[in-house]
Amino acid sequence: MRRLEVIFPDHIATHSKRQIFYYNELGPLARHDYWPDVLAGTPAVQIATEYQSFSGIKMATKRRIYPLNPDNSYLTDPLLVSIDILAANFV
């Protein structure tokens, strides 16, 4: 898995200034670590799975957000956020 760490400049609005993106061997995003301001900087990890193509654009249809541990591992309980995308249109 390849890792890309990004520190966003202050003029870019984002939920977390520091973010780490993990891409699997085939290219799609598999994991996203961040420290969201809405959770007072509490570390979180978003796992992206079940990619499908919508209007020719592939996107993860399942996203799960869990607490991130200091050692870079994560817990699967509690589940903080669950996102299931059933359909998408791009115009």
Image (cartoon, grey):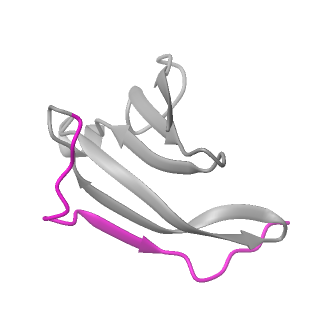
Vertical relation: 74 (above or below) 77: above
Kindly identify the residue that appears in the image at 74 percent across and 70 percent down.
Answer: 53
Q: Is residue 58 left or right of residue 51?
A: right
- Residue 81 found in image quarter: bottom left
Residue 5 lies in the magenta stretch: no
Quarter holding the C terminus is: bottom right
Vertical relation: 21 (above or below) 45: above
Q: Is residue 82 left or right of residue 85?
A: left
Kindly identify the residue that appears in the image at 76 percent across and 73 percent down.
Answer: 89
Foreground pick, 67 / 36: 67
- Residue 69 found in image quarter: top left
Numbered range of the magenta stretch? 72-91
**Main SS of the magenta segment?**
loop
Q: Is residue 4 left or right of residue 75?
A: right
Kindly identify the residue that appears in the image at 50 percent across and 64 percent down.
Answer: 49
Kindly identify the residue that appears in the image at 40 percent across and 39 percent down.
Answer: 15
Please state the total of marks drawn on the protein image.
0
Residue 77 lies in the magenta stretch: yes
Percent coordinates x, y for residue 30 in the rendering: 49, 51
Percent coordinates x, y for residue 56 in the rendering: 84, 66
